[in-house]
Image: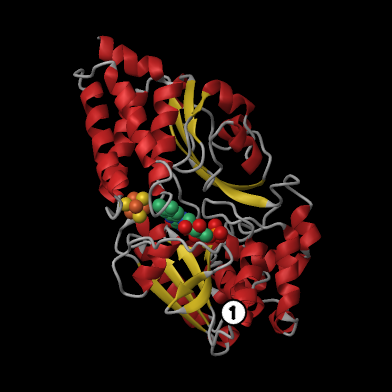
Amino acid sequence: MQVVSAKFDIKNANQIEVAKQHGAYSNLKQILSLEPSHIMDLVDKSGLRGKGGGGGSCGAKWKNMVAYASKTNAQKRYLVINGDESEPGTCKDKYILNLDPHLLIEGIIISAHGLGASRAFVYIRGEYEREFVSLNNAIKEAKDELDGFEIVVYKGAGAYVCGEKTALLESIEGKRGHPRLKPHDKKEPDFLFGSPCVVNNVETIASVPFIVKNGWEAYRSFGTEQSPGAMLFQVSGCVNSPCVKELPFGYKMIDFINEFGGGVWRGRELKAVIPGGSSAAVLTKDEVLKATLDYESLKEFKSALGTGGMMVFDDSVSMPNVLLNLLEFYTEESCGQCTPCREGCGWGLRVVEKIVHGEGKMSDLQTLKDICYMLDGKTVCVFAPAVKDVIMGFITKFESEFKALIND
Ligand SMILES: Cc1cc2nc3c(=O)[nH]c(=O)nc-3n(C[C@H](O)[C@H](O)[C@H](O)COP(=O)(O)O)c2cc1C
Ligand code: SF4
């Protein structure tokens, strides 16, 4: 079943005439004549979960924002689309932006109607020049369908942390992209230019036309009870055919790697997989053999489905080296406003560097655990706790490789 990838294999489906021949904007007038609350109900009942990494309920987030905006008589509401896609191992939103930008625009028009949003903003990763051009061209083509509704396309400047929704909002407002302190009241929505807004991932919003046109039952008819529907899964690393493929939730991870990724390359053995973009804890081979591609299964292994981007490692890969590489990334990308994150990432990097270069001590493993304690639950955003999950995953599951480097 294809929710967002139905037009990926159709030539020139990024052009409005071709997209329309394959169902884009069909019944749009009729859909826009529906009560906004009806659209919200459909999305809520479908069980659609956010595809940006957290996997929260899309319907609950929408209802929360609308209730707050009504209660406070907000003059404006906004819809913000997160196309920052900077999580290592993740490359799905670019497929939608390049191959079927009209699906995203249709999703924006319908979602904005449901939310009562007067304008939409799309934030695109700084390096995504082609995607930026593709979406802007499609917006120009869809002038009639937009009927005066404005979509502002905003380009990032290459900071990973600007994918965090509040850093992204700060960035759109023209400020430094630092995550905001979270409000004590969980019912308070996010705000852009002082008005309530929702932030959703590109794939989340691109899923909305399918749900509204086919009904929530159609979306729920595949996937699992708690992870309904489908997702664009990605596989990269030590496989024969890195790919992006939409599948219902619940598919066996190892089957995905073998059937769509062409299996582990060069006749080697599987060693490990990072399942959901680099911020999800690494899985051992045994765990990969048991895991299914849904939120609950990955949670059982104290990891996360995240963005559905799997990175595969074969038995020739040194796991301390992989951790070193990841910590270089996180040290570079920490926005620096929280001391535990700013100092902890760099400190962790220096310790792992020492171990990899044969200068480590056994006590360094305890130092890494102490750094993880500092990174967890003491910072403005979940960047630092995610780095803790990354470090702990490597040093507990592949402890023997770290010890071997230290002993040698
Ligand atoms: C450090 C960091 C980076 C993130 N990067 C992205 C990103 O590139 N794209 C994205 O959609 N969400 C990203 N997120 C998640 C967003 O904060 C937010 O939860 C998401 O955009 C909400 O959309 P969804 O509910 O549709 O998933 C990131 C979160 C963190 C903490
Ligand atoms: S946890 Fe790190 S990335 Fe997040 S706000 Fe603090 S310093 Fe910035």
Q: Residues within 10 Å of mark 1 (few under 14, many from 20)?
A: many
Which residue occupies the foreground of this view, 362 or 128? 362
For the rendered model, the colour scheme is secondary structure
What residue sits 36% from the left and 75% below the top? Answer: 173
Q: Residue placed farthest to the front in the image?
A: 184
295 displayed left or right of 142? right
Q: Nearer the viewer, residue 391 or 257?
A: 391
Q: Identify the amino acid type marked 1.
A: Ala
Asked where in the image residue 22 lies, by quadrant, the reply is bottom right
Residue at position x 29%, y 32% from top?
324
**Is 5 on the left or on the right of 155, as rendered?**
right
Which residue position holds label 1?
69
Residue 349 place in picture, x, y as percent? 26, 34
**Viewer can see residue 116:** no
Q: Position of residue 264 (x, y in %)?
A: 49, 27
Please state if 7 lies on the left or on the right of 131 as rendered: right
Q: Nearer the viewer, residue 176 or 264?
A: 176
Residue for point 57% across, 25% down: 287
Give the residue at x 56% y 75%.
16
